Amino acid sequence: MTGKKSSLSPSRSAPQARRPASRPGAAPRRSSRQGGHTAVRQPRSPSPSPRGSRRPRRALRSFLFTFLLTMAVVLPCALGIGFYWQATHPSENPGPAALSQSNEADSSAATTGSSSEAETSPDSASPAVDLSGLSSREAILLRRGGVVLGEENADESIYPASLTKMMTVLLAAENFDDLDASVTLDEELFSPLWAANASLAGFEPGEVVTVRDLLYGAMLPSGAECCAAIAQALDGSEAAFADRMNRRARDLGMENTHFVNATGLQDSDHRSTVRDLALLLDAALDNPTFREVFTAPRYSTSPTNLHPDGITVYSSALSLFQDADLGRMTLLGGKTGFTDEAGLCLATLAEADGAEYILVTAGAPGQSHTDTAHARDAAAVYQRLSDALAG
């Protein structure tokens, strides 16, 4: 029997498929035999995977979402806390206007100093002056306005003597409506004054004078009869007028002063200090009438029923300095005072370079008509002040 080729036998060898190169780390390909052939699984064609490009986008979206969510929560909270702090701590969080004002205030303070320093600290116009070594036991020097330049026992209680008359003249200047009104000097005013050997301006009992004449007569020659007439004309008695004096003293801040009469005649309850008297003079000089009287070197009264030609009176204070060397200072006015218990007292006003200065001294030894220790003290102090101003 003629044999036939089996259909299962290949007449020729089939071409063998090319095996793709294996990727590093890839699992080996599995093969199987089917129908006598070796079948090789072909790998799937690789397709581009979107995972690699999507990951950065997802991360960015996640970050933005988280950031926006955080800001949406944190920012309102922070603003709320800030507003609350500013509302509850305004002084610690000044606004622009407050900062501007603060900067301006700081600049001003750096340039001119504080108000308290301006009142108490010496400067080129208000230098400190040594008041030691004077004959007067008590003394005070100040620049007008209250800047004290020097003092010695300024708060020691003293008898003010005729420096009292500065208050009497001030009250007359403040309370008489008409300075040309007539006043009659009753005879009863003179008896106690003669008995006390008080200084007089030269008017006589029953003389009819003007209020203006009384002011100059009380200040320049220290006429006690003028003061008694002022007290009687204003308040009916010297005791009632003394009450007015004490009320005015309290208004002026004269804390250590008590008046019992209008003249300054000796009384154990009639007391003051040089500081209080300087305060009185500083305030009184703001009154134009008082200033005119205080600074006058002389005055001629109007004709009266007993002095048809009037009386001419002179400043007893200014007459003490006719030949005095005061340096660059100019003496403008003054008031003297004396009793045996008070000693020689003096209040003066001087000027230099447009600034005015007040000096009050008390307790100098001597007699009123023979000694000038108080005037020598004033000249010495003004010389010291002159040197200090000159630098």
Image (cartoon, rainbow, N blue to C red):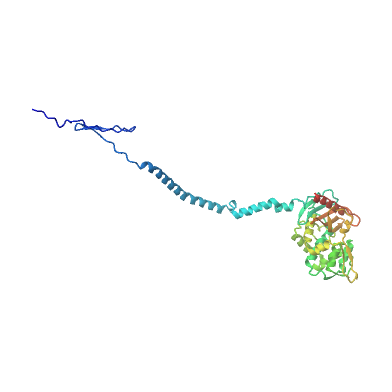
Q: Residue at x 82, y 66 (%)?
A: 230
Count of numbered circles in the view: 0
The quarter holding residue 162 reads bottom right
Q: Nearer the viewer, residue 147 or 158?
A: 147
Q: Position of residue 229 (x, y in %)?
A: 84, 67
Look at the picture and state if 7 lies above or below 60: above
Residue at position x 56%, y 52% in the image: 86
Residue at the limit of the structure toward the bottom, as seen here: 305
Q: Residue at x 74, y 61 (%)?
A: 251
How far across and down, in percent of the image, does residue 241 sit? 80, 65
Query: Is residue 113 shown to the viewer in this render?
Result: no
* 237 in relation to 107, above or below: below
Looking at the image, which residue sits at the far left?
A: 1
Nearest the viewer among 370 and 141 is 141
Quarter of the picture holding the N terminus = top left
Spot occupied by residue 110 in the image (x, y as percentages of width and height): 69, 50
Q: Is residue 85 visible?
A: yes
Please name whichever residue, 100 or 378, is drawn nearer the observer in this view of the structure. Answer: 100
52 relative to 8 in the view: left or right = right
Query: Residue 154: x percent and y percent?
Result: 79, 52
